Image (tube, rainbow, N blue to C red):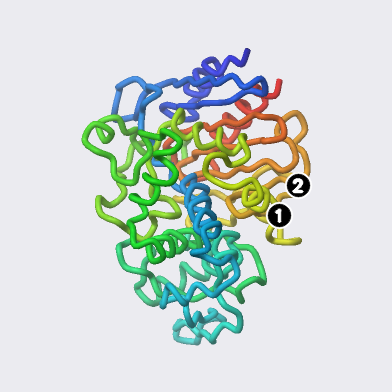
Amino acid sequence: MIDLQSLLDQAVVDGCAPGFSAAVITRDGQRSSACAGVRGADNAVPMTTDTMFAIFSCTKALTSVAALQLVERGLLDLDAPVGERLPVLAAPVVLTGFDAAGAPITRPASAPVTLRRLLTHTSGLAYDFCSESLARYLAATGGALMGADNPDLPLMFEPGEAWLYGIGIDWTGRLIEAVTGQGLDAYFAENILGPLGMADTTFFPDAGQAARKASVHQRLPDGSLISIPFGMPSRPHFMMGGGGLYSTAEDYLKFLAAILDGGAPLLKPETFAMMMHNQVGDFAAGGLKTAQPMLSNDFEPLPGVTKRWGLAGLINTDPVPGCRSTGSLAWAGLANCYYWADPAAGAAGVVLSQVLPFGDPAVVATFEAVERAVYA
């Protein structure tokens, strides 16, 4: 039997994070969860299995599934221009450079932004923490990604011509709202969280859930960790679909269990099969080059393993020796939250911490140790 507790305890002793929570499904179908340490460097309350974490981009897989539900219902088309529903994306422009004064130079895009491109990070939309060009554009224009308003931003390349991690799934959340007339929180509650019994997954924690939140931390150059102020806005904001959820490890495992079960009860088998298939051709996916080292390190998941992007996350097209099978789904959240789901082997797991910058080597090593233990 996997000794999840010892792995997490040792990671806390080693200073990887003040606390961890993790939950796994082993190949024989057994579920196991554990937690270690405390909720924060500023919060000596012991970590518990019901501790709430900001899971950031672990939100993306749920938003992607929500969009695919609407494709099944005929309300969305993967390859139709999304500008029909989202006017800001109706006539996108591509950033081509900056003039001598530092002002951005753009030109009209020749291809449309589509839902498939939003879901696969091939739309040309970027995040500023992993795009120096977008970070420079925002500095020159005074723009921002965060907030309730729709950001009017250029593309970094022609839609469909490359892979770059970006705000496509944040826009997908807005697309879901435009099509359904519901807030994304209401749609999730009715169509994903409710059916899976994910009662501790939410965009807007109530008072009881807020009292159970772990603190977010920044790792300093000497390796120590300090708590930092953090909280998602209490009203709907642009980043909801791409990174707005709070959850617990045990709750998120319920979503991963649905992935192991072929998408049931959320998706039809044929939709699930499409979701888990490479959608980006030969574009390498998953690697991030940081433009904001305080937020993210350079990150290359599964070094040496061929990786592509499906319609809901990273897909390894080679097996990982001693770990996940070919065709597994995986991704992560900014504060060093990581998950994988391996339908072929029936194994899955999630490891949650609240540490910046992303791609912290010590936390990544902890996640890898948990995965290896599941397959051992």
* Residue at (38, 46) in percent of width and height: 190
Q: Of helix, strand and loop, which one carries label 1? A: loop
Image coordinates for residue 302, horizontal then vertical, percent? 69, 42
Q: Is residue 300 visible?
A: no
* Residue at (55, 57) in percent of width and height: 72
Image coordinates for residue 233, horizontal then vertical, percent? 28, 52
Dot 2: within a 10 Å radius of its alpha carbon, few (fewer than 14), some, or many (20 or more) residues? some
* Residue at (54, 75) in percent of width and height: 81
Please count the marks in the image.
2
Mark 1 sits on what residue? 278
In the figure, is residue 237 to the left or right of 137? Answer: left
Q: Of helix, strand and loop, which one carries label 2? A: loop
* Amino acid at pointer 1: Asn
Q: Residue furthest top?
A: 1
* Residue at (29, 27) in percent of width and height: 43
Mark 2 sits on what residue? 317
Q: Nearer the viewer, mark 1 or mark 2?
A: 1
In the figure, is residue 234 to the left or right of 326? Answer: left
Residue 110, numbered label: none
Pointer 1 and pointer 2: residues touching (CB < 8 Å)?
A: yes
* Amino acid at pointer 2: Thr
Q: Quadrant of the C terminus?
A: top right
Asked whether 61 or 350 is in front, the reply is 61
